[in-house]
Amino acid sequence: MSITIKDIAKYAGVSYSTVSKALRNSPLVKEPTKKKIIKIAEELGYQPNVVARSLVQKKSYTIGVVWPTVERVAPSVLITQINYLLESHSYTTLLSINKPESAIATFNRFQVDAILVFGENEEDFNPAKNYASSVPILYYGISKNTDYLTIDVNRRLAIKLAVQYLKKIGHEQIAYIGDMSSTDPLQKEKFIGYLEALNELSLAVKPEMIISTNGLELYDGYLAAKSLWHAGDDQVTALVCGSYDLTRGILRAAQEQKKRIPDDLSIISYDNIPQVENLDVRISKVGVPIDRIAKAITKTILNIIDGNDVQSSIILEPELKVMDSCAPLNK
C-alpha cells in the first residue's frame, strides 16, 4: 500500500494542508514542524505523486536545460548550482545536449514549466529566431538581437578590468589567450574587451601576443601558451585568459617552461569560480561570481513560471579578485 499525504498528517498530528505545504518547503510552515513532517515522510517511505500534483497545480515541476557541454568545469559548476537551487523549490532539471531546436521540441512534449538555453554557439542557436515553444524560454547569453528573456554577463567589462589592473601594477606587455572563433558570441565579447582596454590605455596591439585557441579545453590552453612564448620571445610579462580550463593548460605549459608565477608572469583568468583558487597557484580571477549567476537564473525562471513581471534583459556586472598570481612588474 502506498503512503499518502493523509497518512503522514495522521502520524504527525497535523492537517493535510500543513503536510502539503511542508513537503513543498513552504515558508508558511514553521521550521521545526517542517523538519518533523519531512522526517516522518522519509521513515514511512513516502513517494510524491508527481502526475497528480501537476494536474492539480498545472505544473510539471521540471525545467528543461539546453546544455552546451559536459566537459568544461565552469559550465558544470554553474548547472550544479542551478540544479541545487531549483531542487530546493521542488523542481527537477532535465538536461539535453542535443541541438537547441530538437531539445526545445522534446521539452515541449514533456510539458516542462520552462526552458533554459545556454547560448554558446550561434550556429546551433540563433537568438533572433523564434523557436516553436508553448513554454517560456530563458536565454543565458548575449542579450543583443533576441526577443527572449535573457540573463547576460558583462564579459567585455570583465576582461577590461583585468587588463586595467595589470597596467596599474606596471605591466604593458599583456597577452591574451582565448577562443576567438566566429561561432561563440560569449568568447568574442571577451576578446573585444581586451582590444578596447588596450586602446583605452594607449597600449599597442601586438598580434604575436594574441593567441586564439579555437577551443576551451585544458589542452587548448597548453598549446596556446607554448605558441605564445615561442612567438612572443619572452616579451610577455602578464596574461589574461578566457576561461578556467584554458588557465589549467597554461599553468602546465608554464611549469614545463620553468616560468615562475607571478615572478616571471602575472595571470588573470576569466571564470569567477571557487575552483580557480585550488590550482597550484591561487589564480586571480575576473567575472561574475558563479553563485550570483546561478541565483539570478533561478530567480528569473521561477518568476517566469509564476507569471511575474521580469526584465527582458538582465546584465550582471563582473568582479575582479586578485590572488597570488599577480605581482607588480620589476623594471
Image (cartoon, rainbow, N blue to C red):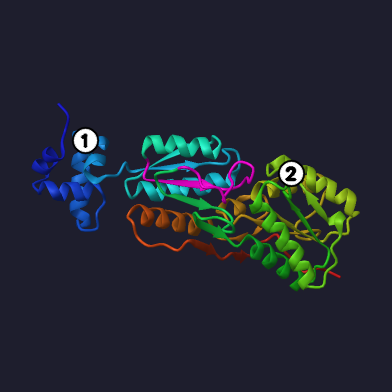
The answer to whether 157 is drawn above or below residue 126 in the figure is: below
Report the amino acid beneath label 1.
Tyr
Image quarter where the N terminus lies is: top left
The residue positioned 84% from the left and 50% from the top of the image is 228
Callout count = 2
* Quadrant in the rendering for residue 43: top left
Q: Give the secondary structure at mark 2.
A: loop
Q: Which residues are magenta?
A: 112-132
Residue positioned most to the top: 1
Image quarter where the C terminus lies is: bottom right
Cα–Cα span, label 2 and label 1? 50 Å
Identify the residue under disc 2: 214
Circle nearer the viewer, 2 or 1: 2
- Where residue 205 sits in the image (x, y, percent)? 84, 63
Report the amino acid beneath label 2.
Asn
> Neighbour class for label 2 at 10 Å: few (<14), some, many (≥20)?
some
Left of 200 or right of it: where is 235?
right
Q: Is residue 76 visible?
A: yes
The residue positioned 74% from the left and 48% from the top of the image is 250
Q: Give the secondary structure at mark 1.
A: loop
Identify the residue under disc 1: 46
The answer to whether 310 is drawn above or below residue 12 in the figure is: below
Depth check, front residue: 264 or 194? 194
The answer to whether 242 is drawn above or below residue 310 in the figure is: above
- Of mark 2 and mark 1, the one earlier in the sequence is 1
Q: Is residue 119 magenta?
A: yes
